[in-house]
């Protein structure tokens, strides 16, 4: 457990730092108003649906480099990085073009959200799409450093980028230092510039540092090797699907908030509560990356007993940490929303603050399940067991969690503002729905996370015994 935490600490800090960019954006946007805060939440969640599949390829890169590092094969580790940068770069470009085209040329991305939210979100989404390529390439370089037990270097550059992002937000959102007042668009521009900056400085350092020797000739860098690319895609595609299915379920919860009669209020309150839940989630998420890498290294060393100890020790650490954070949500639920919003911002602000404090109770209820399921999934990835966990995630979140949340949240009698196809389906159902509004969605999330955690733990128990 000490060795896992030694690797996990900078990874956790890196994940927290990455998420703090979003937290800072939301906190500063919340000073502009409720509608920009709701629009930023909607746009950010739609962006991550496109982004997170490509992050599965980055996870595969870390696992493969970790196995090579466990075999003391530095040349192979660098070769995996080269392949990973090519694959991840192409995937990120395709994702950015797809998201940009969806926003610019179709209305499919509206997803039944209020018009005041959509008008604010459109250009912000374009900025986020542009930032996907530098974000994923930086993540690939960061994953390589972590897999070879050098995780602190990318963390330092990431912290510098966060400071730059805060400064650029101050300049462009509020129009300081002679810049125009851009509001939400200013936050998008600041995000693009900060992500490009972090990629450039990390790549420049790794290219010239003696410990990395990443000085490929451009022809050698773009050399096509189908077998290794297929190996990465074969491992990374199920991981990307698993991450996307899970996060997209949480994103679907965001979209359901926009369908409620008090859409902007529910969306803004959900934004506050889920941001706190996601912030503490970065700790078990960092553990997930560390446990994947360490189990990969142990398998490279052919030490299966060590791999099992790494897995169960990491799960115990995640459960203990999330239990403490859940308690803090209960104790400070009335104070925490004020970080993002103050009653003086607008007439809807008091309602947002009251609902957010209630939703934080549900975040406390699923905290332990959330930490256990993500670390367990990381342990299974270290064993290269990715197909069945992906199927489990799909069944639990999309066939159980979301339908339960939908039925609890809405009254299916035509009084709720559902999108056309869903309204027709709802009217044909023989049940009326509970009408719990935002709280119903969060009950569904609690239910799904509990089932996911138990199912994945049982799968890990089987795989660890017979890898």
Image (cartoon, helix red, strand yellow):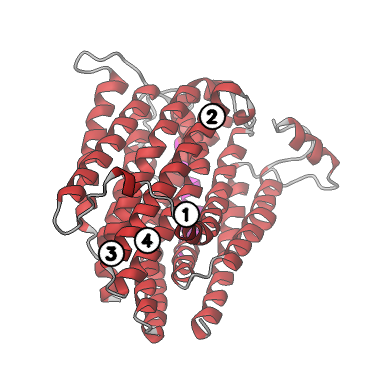
For the point 40% across and 47% down, the residue is 86
Which x, y percent locates residue 363?
Answer: 48, 54
- In this picture, residue 32 sits left or right of residue 422: left
C-alpha distance separating marks 4 and 2: 39 Å
For marks 1 and 3, the one nearer the N-term is: 1
Give the residues drawn in magenta, as a range. Answer: 353-368
For the point 69% across and 56% down, the residue is 399
Q: Which residue is mark 2?
A: 264
Looking at the figure, which quarter contains the N terminus?
bottom left
Dot 4 and dot 2 residues touching (CB under 8 Å): no
Q: Which mark is residue 62?
A: 4
- In this picture, residue 174 sits left or right of residue 447: left
For the point 26% across and 74% down, the residue is 3
The residue closer to the viewer here, 88 or 216, is: 216
C-alpha distance separating marks 4 and 3: 15 Å
Which x, y percent locates residue 85?
Answer: 37, 49
């Amino acid at each position: 457990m000490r060795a896992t935490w030694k690797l996990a600490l900078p990874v956790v800090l890196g994940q927290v730092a990455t998420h703090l960019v979003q937290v800072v954006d939301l906190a500063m946007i919340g000073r502009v108003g409720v509608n920009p805060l709701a629009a930023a939440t909607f746009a950010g969640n739609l962006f991550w649906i496109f982004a997170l599949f490509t992050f599965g390829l980055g996870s595969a890169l870390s696992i493969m480099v970790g196995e090579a590092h466990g075999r003391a094969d530095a040349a192979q580790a660098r070769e995996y990085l080269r392949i990973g940068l090519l694959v991840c770069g192409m995937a990120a470009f395709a994702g950015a073009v797809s998201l940009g085209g969806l926003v610019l040329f179709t209305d499919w991305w509206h997803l039944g959200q209020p018009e005041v939210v959509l008008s604010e979100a459109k250009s912000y989404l374009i900025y986020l799409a542009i930032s996907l390529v530098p974000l994923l390439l930086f993540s690939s370089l960061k994953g390589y450093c972590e897999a070879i037990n050098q995780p602190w270097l990318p963390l330092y550059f990431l912290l510098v980028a966060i400071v730059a992002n805060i400064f650029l937000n101050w300049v462009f959102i509020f129009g300081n230092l002679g810049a125009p007042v851009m509001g939400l668009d200013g936050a998008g521009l600041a995000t693009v510039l900060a992500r490009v900056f972090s990629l450039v400085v990390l790549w420049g350092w790794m290219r010239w540092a003696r410990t990395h020797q990443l000085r490929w000739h451009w022809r050698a860098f773009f050399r096509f090797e189908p077998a290794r690319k297929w190996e990465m895609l074969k491992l990374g595609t199920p991981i990307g699907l698993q991450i996307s299915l899970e996060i997209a379920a949480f994103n679907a919860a965001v979209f359901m908030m926009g369908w409620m009669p008090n859409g902007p209020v529910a969306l803004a309150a959900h934004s506050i509560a889920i941001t706190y839940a996601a912030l503490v989630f970065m700790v078990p998420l960092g553990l997930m990356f560390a446990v994947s890498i360490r189990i990969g290294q142990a398998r490279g060393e052919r030490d299966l007993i060590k791999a099992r100890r790494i897995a169960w020790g990491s799960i115990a650490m995640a459960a203990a940490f999330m239990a403490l954070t859940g308690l803090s949500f209960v104790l400070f639920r009335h104070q925490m929303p004020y970080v993002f919003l103050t009653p003086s911002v607008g007439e809807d602000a008091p309602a947002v603050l009251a609902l957010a404090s209630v939703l934080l109770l549900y975040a406390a209820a699923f905290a332990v399940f959330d930490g256990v399921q993500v670390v367990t999934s990381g342990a299974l990835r270290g064993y290269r067991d990715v197909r069945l966990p992906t199927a489990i995630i799909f069944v639990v979140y999309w066939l159980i969690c979301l339908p339960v949340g939908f039925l609890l949240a809405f009254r299916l009698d035509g009084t709720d503002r559902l999108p056309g196809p869903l309204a027709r389906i709802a009217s044909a159902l023989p049940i009326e729905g509970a009408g719990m509004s935002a709280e119903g969605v969060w009950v569904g999330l609690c239910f799904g996370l509990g089932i996911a955690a138990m199912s994945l733990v049982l799968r890990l128990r089987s795989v660890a015994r017979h890898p």
